[in-house]
Image: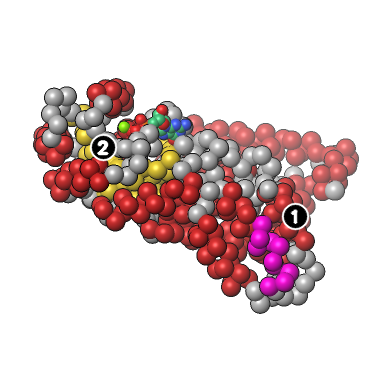
Amino acid sequence: LSDKLSSALRNVRGVGKLSEDNMADALKEVRTALLSADVHFKVARQFVDKVREQVVGQEVLKGVTPGQQIIKIISDELEQLLGSGETQLNPKKPLKVLMVGLHGSGKTTSTAKLGRLLKKKGYASPHVVACDIYRPAAIDQLEILAQANELGFTCDRTSKDVPAIGRAGLAAAKAAGSELIIFDTAGRLQIDEDLIKEVQRLKDVVVPDEIILVADGALGQEAVNVAKAFHEALGLTGLILTKLDGDARGGAALSIKSITGVPIKFVGVGEKTEDFETFHPDRLASRILGMGDVVSLVEKAQENIDEKEAERMAEKLRKADFNLEDFLAQMQQVKKMGSMQSIMGMLPGMNNVQLDDGHEKQMGRTEAIIQSMTLQERRKPMILNGSRRMRIANGAGVKVVEVNQLLKQFQQMQKMMKMMKGSKGRKMMKKMQG
Ligand code: GDP
Ligand code: MG
């Protein structure tokens, strides 16, 4: 399917203007891609109409193929729809969060995951409250998770009065000085009146700052009705999309977001408590489109790396006078190509792989270290003595060992370059530059 989409997009070429005609096949494939990612059919139609409106009549830009231009418009539009920059939680402290959703969607798991994540982000003594009274196992499940993640816990194994349990939870959390209280509730297989009424009563008592719908990423066409019902009854403030580690392509997210306007705030990417992330619209956009396409990866690279800059670098490498300033510039070039995640998303079969933030964080730290150096230091790293290194580490907010590591890496690189300076090396460079 994604192959079909990319070949349809590649076929739009050699035209001065994008028109309804030369776009028709490509847009049809986009619609098919959306539908097979479980996007609601109405949402898919609206989306394609919007893209068509934007695309038709546009001049084909120099230096990019029409297909690339369309992909860019489509993914921008998708990202915008999925809601960039809206994923923040209400900043209030203490923050009260009510978790709602169907049975098995991942509410209890996500309650613990959210507690753990926000605890790491500095919320004092997070507290979770077991308001699913229908299955004793549900209370045990939350208790075990709370213990494992050192979260405060309130339950009542004999009471059937959910609002009273909520009130008790609030009191316990307050006594413990909690800055975060999460209420886990019961679900049903389908939306039903009694369930909604019970959650409404709980809501009236605890007055939550966030009401979050937990939805299974594989929910499909049904997602829209579920989200609508919960939103109308409770006024949702956010969405957690779970089980994105599976086959689900996340179309449910697009449907829910575009029909209710409720922003997606977090995603669940596994069964373990740490398998939980802040939502990134760009990642989900490329996943929904499933654009596994090496061609566009290559094209993207060409588009972003400034030719002259690349030549300058090659020259410097040849002369082996590459310094830390150049190193920083190179790293910024790589960053321009996009995040590692979006690059992975373009490799066939890799668009479902979720990268941890490690790579990008590491790159950010290296950047911070170099930026904390003076120009002179960047050009002549050998002047970096102990006190300079200490000052740089403080400036970059890292440990001195990290500065030392970076310098060691850099020295090794320089050594390699010196080796390549000889005639053998020149041949190698030629080869590399093709
Ligand atoms: P609840 O009924 O809404 O409280 O759902 P639970 O939290 O009990 O989760 C139902 C099942 O889904 C459990 O087996 C969880 O381990 C699993 N689950 C929840 N979130 C995720 C996720 O992001 N990925 C995976 N693979 N499984 C999940
Ligand atoms: Mg549960």
Task: Name the residue located 61 percent from the left edge and 42 percent from the top edge.
Answer: 351
In this view, the residue farthest toward the bottom is 57
Task: Name the residue located 21 percent from the left edge and 34 percent from the top edge.
Answer: 131
- Graded by Cα atoms within 10 Å as few (under 14), some (14 to 19) or many (20 or more), the crowding at tag 2 reads many
Q: In the image, residue 426 lies at what x, y percent? A: 86, 43
Report helix, strand or loop for mark 2: strand
User: Front-most of 320 and 42?
Assistant: 42
Residue at mark 2: C-beta within 8 A of ligand 2:
yes
What secondary structure characterizes most of the magenta part?
helix
**Label ID, residue 25:** none
Relative to 63, is 365 above or below? above
Report helix, strand or loop for mark 1: helix
Task: Name the residue located 42 percent from the left edge and 52 percent from the top edge.
Answer: 224
Residue that numbered label 2 is attached to? 185
Residue 312 lies in quadrant: bottom right
User: Front-most of 120 and 29?
Assistant: 29
- Which corner quadrant of the figure contains ligand 1? top left
Residue that numbered label 1 is attached to? 7
Task: Name the residue located 40 percent from the left edge and 43 percent from the top edge.
Answer: 215
Residue 167 visible somewhere in the drawing: yes
Residue 171 lies in quadrant: top left
Q: Would residue 30 appear left or right of 82 to someone viewing this image?
A: right
Which amino acid type is marked by label 2?
A: Thr
Q: Which residues are magenta?
A: 20-29
Relative to 146, is 383 above or below? below
Residue 119 visible somewhere in the drawing: no
Which amino acid type is marked by label 1?
A: Ser
Q: In the image, residue 5 lies at what x, y percent? A: 69, 54
Q: CA distance from mark 2 to mark 1?
A: 47 Å
Q: In the image, residue 201 lies at what x, y percent? A: 16, 45
Earlier sequence position, callout 2 versus callout 1? 1
Q: Is residue 28 magenta?
A: yes
